[in-house]
Structure formats: structure tokens, C-alpha cells
Image (tube, rainbow, N blue to C red):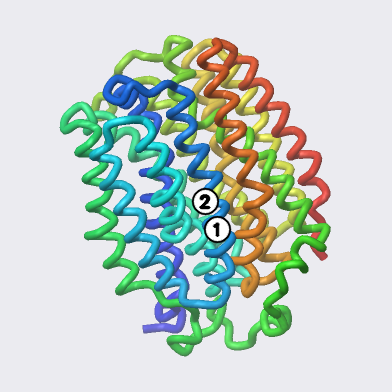
Amino acid sequence: MDKVTKFKGWQMVYTAMMMEFSVVGFVFYCFPLMFAHLERDLGATQSELSGALSLFFIFSVVASIFLGRLLDKYSVKKIMTIGGVFFSLGLFSIAFIEDSFSLLLIYATLIAAGGPALGNLSVTKLVANWFESKAGMALGIAAIGISFSGVVLPILVDPLIDLIGWRNVYLVFGSIVIFILLPTIRFLVIDNPEEVGQKKDNLEVQPKEIVQNNLLEISDFFKSKIFWIISLTFAFQFFAMGGVLLHLPLHSEKIGFIETFSIFGFPIKQYVFAYSLAALGGVAGKILFGYLIDKLMANKPVMIMMLMQSIGIFGLTMSEGFGLFTIFCFIFGMGFGGAMVLMSACFLKAFGSINLGSVRGFSGLIVVPLQPVGIFIVGKSFDLNLYIEAFLMMGAVTLIGFALGSRIIIR
């Protein structure tokens, strides 16, 4: 067995991909498919349902502040395991709720704490522990799980809801965490290459910058100009992306894309297909921007990503034919698909892997609060029948992120 085959870093990447697929898919991509059922069974309004995700983002910030520091000091594997337990309890609990308040409470507690601990925050730290020179590509491949879940799960879960009911679907989600994800963490996750006698990127001679990184104090992050520029750039990106993506299926329905057609004998609704196509664009975006961030100055791929997201939003808002609509869905997906990869890679380049958990956690104080605001604005706009104007505003906000992204210069 050759040296490359023995390297365990890619095992961490594929494990991270699985966690991202499950957490983001269960919390975000499948949730809009439940809206009609939750409105009927719980008497919830569109604003309340959008508010569940808003609360998730707000309270995940609080959780991430503590989790980020813990991830820089303690075992990633143990934190992922604890996060999986919390996350599964949240999913099981949703299956038994009787009112919208219970849904909001679960999203603000068990899901908000368990999601980042099992998913993105922890696995980003895990992958960064194993890669440096190839970190952009490794993070991009790991993050494919985020968008791939949007390609696969809506297509599978939509008919499953009709078959077994939304409550049983959440029981299935919780069981997947308990019986598949937690054992995967137990047997495959290794905190860092040193534990098994390996080195980052499988390189015998480590670059000087890897060796010299030190754990920074909390105040050091907030004193850093590049910390604020990166954080604000992606704050505006997530503000716009969240509001549009969450409501994309509803937008598709409202403009008349409700027909059902067949792919290889499998029935699929037009609005579900459009939603999945945006997620497929996200898969392509993660690979593309993961590659570009390793090759170019950080600001260039960030600007390209923002421009693609903005073009996508304007296009899917104004296009009338389904074919053109799906093209803009894909462009929009490619843009937002690169966001998590580029944000993590920018922070990694600026602060090193030893500080990545902390800097990602504290950046959440800036990045995350704007995302639920965008979701709330678009959700409320649907109630007021002003969502087209809200979508156009999201496209304009992305251009603010484009301008800020041009300032991400990392020496």
C-alpha cells in the first residue's frame, strides 16, 4: 500500500461530507417541503415557519462561540459525538410536537446546539487539522455534502412525506443520526494526523507557517481588520442567500411551476426539481471555488462567487419560462455553493488552523444575525405579497458583499 493510500486526511473529508449532507439536509433543505403540512397540522403561519430557522441561526451563534473555542482546545471527535446526541433528540422531538411554539423551541435549543457541533463548525475544524496547502479543495469536497443533500433529499423526502407522514420522516432522520452518523464518528474520525503518525497534506516537511501558528486571544480577532472584512462580506452573502433559498420552492409554485414530470420513471414536481437544481449548482460551486481559493488571491474567487449569486437571484426573479428559470437557479446555486468554502478558507489563510474554530465561532456574532433577518424579511414579504421586491433587494445586497469581498487581501 503506497504512501498516498495510507493518508487518513481524505477519510476525514468524506466523513465531513456525510455530516454536512445530513445536518444541512435535515434542518434546511427538507424543511420547506414540510411547510404545507406544518401549516395544516400546527396552524403555523409562513412567518412562524421561517422564524424557526431564524431562531436556529440566532441561537447557533451562541452555541458556536463556545463550541469554536472548545474545538481549538479539545477533541473534535468528542464534540461531534455530543452534538450528534443533541441533534438526534431534536429531530425525534419534532415528530411529537402539537403547536408551532414547540417547533420554535426545539430549533432554538437542541437543533441549534447539536447542528454546528455535529456538522459544519466541527467538520471544518477537523478538515483544517489535516490540510493546509490543499485546504481549499479539501474543504470544498467536504462541503459538497451541504449542496448534494439539496439535490437528493428533496426528491426523496417529498414523496416520503406523502407516503408515511411528516412526523415519521423526522423519526427516520433521528434514527439515521443514531444508527449511522454516530457509529461513523466513533470508528472513522481522527482528531489530527499526529495521532496516527502522519502530517498535514501528507507532507514530510511542513511549511513554516503551519509550525509557527499560535492560539490567539479573543480580543486579537476583534482587533483584526481582516476579521471584520471577511465577516461582513459573508454576513451580507448569507443575508441574501438564506431569504431566497428557503423560499425558492414557494416562489416556484407562485409563478406557476407546479407540474409533475418523470425522470427515469420517478415523479418529480417542477418546483422540487428547481430547488434541487440550485443545490446541484452548489455542488459545482464548492468544487470550483475550493480549487480557485488555493490558486488565486482570496478576494478574486469571493468576488466571482458574489457576482454569480447576484445574477442568479435577479434572473430567477424575472425569468418567466421554466427552462430559463432553472438555468438561473443553477447559477444562483453555484454562487451560494462557494460561500462556506470560501469563508472557512479565508479565515484559515488569515488565522491558521489552530484558531479556525475560535475565529469561525466569533465571526458568527457578525455573520449569522443577518441571515435570519433576510429569511424573516422574505417570509413576511410573502405574507404581504411583496416577495418579488424582497428578492430583488436580496440581489442588491449581494452586490454589497461583492464590494466588500474585493477588500479581502490576505498577505
Q: Is residue 286 above or below residue 29?
A: below
User: Element under label 2?
Assistant: helix
Q: Quadrant of residue 103?
A: top left
Query: Badge 2, how many Cα within 10 Å: few under 14, some, many 20+?
Result: many
* Near-viewer residue (405 or 308): 405
Q: Position of residue 100 (x, y in %)?
A: 36, 30
Query: Badge 1, how many Cα within 10 Å: few under 14, some, many 20+?
Result: many
Is residue 82 left or right of 132 when viewed as pictured? left
What residue do we see at 63% from left, 74% from top? 354
Is residue 168 left or right of 339 when viewed as pictured? left
What residue do we see at 44% from left, 20% from top? 250
* Residue behind mark 2: 60
* Residue behind mark 1: 64
Q: Quadrant of the N terminus?
A: bottom left
What residue do we see at 69% from left, 81% from top? 207
What residue do we see at 42% from left, 43% from top? 107
CB atoms of marks 1 and 2 within 8 Å: yes
Q: Position of residue 192 (x, y in %)?
A: 49, 79
- Amino acid under label 2? Ser
CA gap, disc 1 to disc 2?
Answer: 6 Å
